[in-house]
């Protein structure tokens, strides 16, 4: 009950923040964004045609009138149709967000789990060989260009110059029309092809994300190791392994959970522009990349606004997660 009441209060308190987020998004993307008049009219339009189109697009309306029109789009989630394909933006997101989520989820889970594990290993052997080895690996992962990593993994796993185990580009095609195919045969088809196309992008994402995650998680764990309760536990003869897993990791979960939850909106909505473009994966990242390059404002507005709003809700979720991780935390009135 306390958690529910706190959640409701946080939602109410987040309304000004949501207004601020939408105001910034509107100002940058719409008010000072691209003028679509020329792209609609083409060359040599008359002054009357320009005035009519600008009036139809709402460019001649005052700032706050246009902002409240934008808020209406956000509330109803009706951003119109894509200027490139004519498809409804909601249909585009409904089709592409699950693909991006399916691509990003394995790397997201594995990079965080491996990051915590490597951070514990490095902190446990602080100053020793394994600590230095893990930190060198993390720095390499952070230093090398993401594009170079993607190209290298693609050459190693997807070309005749390497192992040639996986396709270079593409995504799951609809299964062949076999009338006698069973549910398990169709499920196996999708499962097999899913891992066939997602493995190389996942490995590339893990290699890059693991460096950032490991360094952050190690810093948090090492900070906990310097607390008084760790020295007290050691004085009572508790083993280092028990201290690391039962006490240090538990107390370090709050900043770890914060980092993980805050990044969720970007996994769900924003996708990975470079990864999906390079591997030809038809997710929201590829759609956003094409929308940016083509000036498809309705799609860009929908993606950026959705990500920003989900980010606000992620902030609320982190506060709720604190109570789950540590029941001693109380919510202030």
Image (cartoon, grey):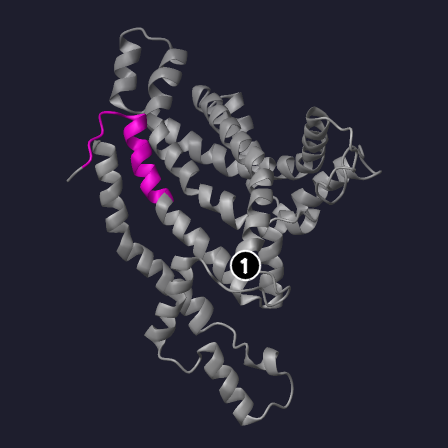
Residue plotted at (49% across, 24% down): 117
Q: In this view, does 279 lie to the left or right of 123?
A: right
Q: Is residue 273 visible?
A: no
**What SS does tag 1 mark?**
helix
Q: Which of 181 and 59 is in front in this view?
A: 181
Q: Quadrant of residue 162?
A: top right
In the current view of this chain or complex, which residue is farthest to the top?
237
Q: Main secondary structure of the magenta part?
A: helix
Look at 62% across and 53% down and name the residue there.
286
Range of residues picked out in magenta? 314-331
Mark 1, residues whose alpha carbon is within 10 Å: few (<14), some, or many (≥20)?
Answer: many
Q: Residue furthest left?
A: 333
Horizontally, residue 327 falls left or right of residue 145, namely left
Where is 147 relative to 241, above or below?
below
State the residue position of label 1: 89
Quick one: which residue is furthest to the right in this view?
A: 160
Above or below, comparing residue 115 to residue 265 in the picture: above
Could you say where residue 14 lies in the image, as x and y percent from the top left? 28, 51
Q: Examine the image and state in which quarter residue 7 appears.
A: top left
Please provide percent x and percent y for residue 69.
Answer: 39, 69
Q: Does the rendering let one see residue 206?
A: yes
Magenta residue check for 232: no
């Amino acid at each position: 009950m306390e958690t529910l009441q706190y959640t409701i209060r946080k939602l109410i308190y987040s309304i000004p923040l949501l207004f601020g987020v939408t105001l910034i998004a509107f100002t940058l993307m719409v008010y000072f964004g691209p003028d679509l008049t020329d792209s609609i009219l083409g060359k040599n339009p008359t002054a009357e045609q320009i005035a009519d189109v600008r009036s139809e697009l709402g460019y001649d309306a005052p700032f706050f009138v246009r902002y409240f029109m934008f808020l209406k789009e956000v509330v109803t989630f009706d951003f119109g149709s894509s200027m490139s394909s004519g498809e409804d933006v909601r249909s585009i997101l409904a089709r592409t967000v699950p693909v991006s989520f399916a691509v990003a989820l394995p790397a997201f889970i594995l990079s965080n789990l491996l990051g915590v594990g490597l951070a514990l290993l490095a902190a446990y052997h602080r100053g020793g060989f394994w600590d230095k080895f893990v930190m060198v690996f993390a720095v390499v992962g952070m230093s090398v260009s993401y594009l170079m990593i993607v190209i290298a993994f693609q050459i190693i796993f997807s070309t005749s110059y390497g192992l040639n185990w996986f396709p270079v580009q593409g995504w799951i095609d609809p299964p062949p029309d076999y009338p006698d195919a069973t549910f398990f045969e169709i499920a196996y088809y999708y499962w097999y092809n899913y891992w066939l196309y997602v493995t190389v992008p996942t490995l590339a994402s893990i290699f890059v994300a693991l460096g950032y995650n490991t360094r952050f998680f190690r810093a948090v764990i090492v900070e906990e190791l310097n607390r008084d309760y760790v020295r007290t536990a050691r004085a009572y003869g508790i083993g280092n392994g028990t201290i690391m897993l039962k006490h240090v990791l538990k107390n370090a979960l709050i900043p770890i959970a914060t980092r993980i939850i805050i990044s969720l909106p970007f996994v769900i909505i924003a996708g990975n522009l470079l990864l999906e473009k390079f591997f030809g994966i038809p997710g929201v990242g590829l759609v956003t990349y094409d929308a940016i390059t083509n000036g498809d404002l309705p799609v860009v507005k929908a993606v950026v606004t959705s990500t920003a709003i989900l980010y606000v809700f992620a902030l609320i979720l982190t506060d709720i997660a604190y109570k789950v991780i540590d029941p001693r935390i109380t919510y202030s009135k």
